[in-house]
Image (spheres, rainbow, N blue to C red):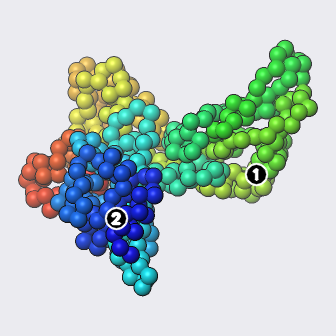
Amino acid sequence: MNISMIQSMINAIEKPAIFIDHSYIIKAINQAYSDHYVSEVVVGKSYCYQISHQAENPCDQHGEDCPLAICKESNKSHRVLHIHKNGSEKEYCDILMRPVVNDDGITVGFLEILDQVSYASHRSANDKLIGLSSAFKQMVEMINRCAQSDISVLLHGETGTGKELVANAIHQASVRKDHPFVVVECTGLTETLFESELFGHEKGAFTGATTSKKGLIDLAHGGTLFLDEVGDIPLNLQIKLLRLLETGSYRAVGGMATKHADFRLICASHKNLPNMVKEQHFRQDLYYRLAAFPLYLPSLSQRKEDIPLLAKHYLGQSSKKQKSFSAAALTTLMLYPFPGNVRELKNIVERAILMSDDDLIDINCLGLNYELPNNPVNLDKQANTLTLAQLEQHYLRIICQNNTHKTAQEIADMLGVSKRTFYRKLQLHHISY
């Protein structure tokens, strides 16, 4: 396979794409890649990590999995989520790496296709999912996968984990993004209200129906229908939803005309639906219709390194954005279990803003009944002690969160270690920077 054939192959790809040899050198690029990156690519000389990370060594040497290295080892396609640098900006990218094999079965290089993740951010941003933790990245990877088709998605996780935001992210990453995203809150819907809200009704269909009304399925035509807390739908109404999904058709309440539905379905519940199926509180046939692609949303306690980032994000959204958190306050937040998840964190930040009399928010403003003793090993009241490694991990997370504007070398200098040691510590504690 010669370079002209490879160039023709990547020119046919709409997304940014490059061909890389075994030594990480870019041998061919398409126009979308050239248009996307600020850095100029010198074909045959530029290394892929110089363009995507503005680094001097492969990404697995500074805290991220290297898809090319994994492809070389497995000789199979591999997908990863990375934070790429583009000029002065950083962005999440979903990367698909594929080995390119010639007629003799020899891998001659690797095709890298990039997809910018516009709905997620590693720093404060409005109307985006925000995070840096490995649990957050795994969730984003799953969002990217299920967004590629119209498969029904069931979001499950604790209350306050942001199910509606994730549902909207799936919608925004799909081909239906230019059509409506319609939310249905299923809690407390009676049979008449459920049918009327979902299917619409004709004038005179029931007492009080003085005019005709379009249903939410009509409004979601071509887009996405999000059923929040689908586990709260009573059994007698579940059959109506199942019939809609099986036939793809429905009728307005009081109407005779059959309408055809065109929507992508996403559902969410904090309840254990498989247990509800066993206890016969939820229809098994409906469950399997809804849960074609189950997607778990991690709790905030499973993504502790995101807590400082989210706390500062909510602080920045307030009218007191000049305020800041002390290191002790951020550490205390990271050690708190957050039973109410992201929703609770937002409330705590809002309360702390009101409780602080100056621009520094300390632990006594958080209202967590947590105290920071002089002895740091007693910080975690649940575990009673923190090991030296745990303290180092907490400290590194806070340092990285508070210094995203600095280079790795600058942070290493600040910590009094070499850049190599800094990266080694990040890898040891599974921290991305």
Q: Quadrant of residue 226?
A: top right
Q: Which residue is mark 1?
A: 286
Residue 322, placed above or below residue 86: above
Q: Residue at 86%, 37% (x, y): give it.
A: 258
- Distance from label 2 to label 1 (Cα)? 45 Å
The image shows residue 366 at horizontal and vertical percentages of 34, 31
The image shows residue 230 at horizontal and vertical percentages of 68, 42
Q: Residue at 26%, 45% (x, y): give it.
A: 38
Residue 268 is at least partly visible in this image: yes
Question: Which amino acid is tagged 1?
Answer: Leu
Outermost residue, front direction?
Answer: 4
Q: Residue at 41%, 63% (x, y): give it.
A: 8
Q: Which residue is mark 2?
A: 19
Residue 398 is at least partly visible in this image: no
Q: Quadrant of residue 417?
A: bottom left
Q: Which mark is residue 142?
A: none
Question: Which amino acid is tagged 2?
Answer: Phe
Q: For mark 2, does the 10 Å Cα neighbourhood hold few (<14), some (14 to 19), or many (20 or more) residues? A: many
Q: Earlier in the sequence, mark 2 or mark 1?
A: 2
Relative to 355, 360 lies left or right: left
Relative depth, front residue between 313 and 9: 9
Question: Image quadrant for the N terminus?
Answer: bottom left
Relative depth, front residue between 254 and 368: 254
> Answer yes or no: do the residues labelled 2 and 1 have beta carbons within 8 Å?
no
Q: Residue at 84%, 14% (x, y): give it.
A: 210
The image shows residue 327 at horizontal and vertical percentages of 22, 39
Local SS, label 1: helix
Relative depth, front residue between 409 and 146: 146
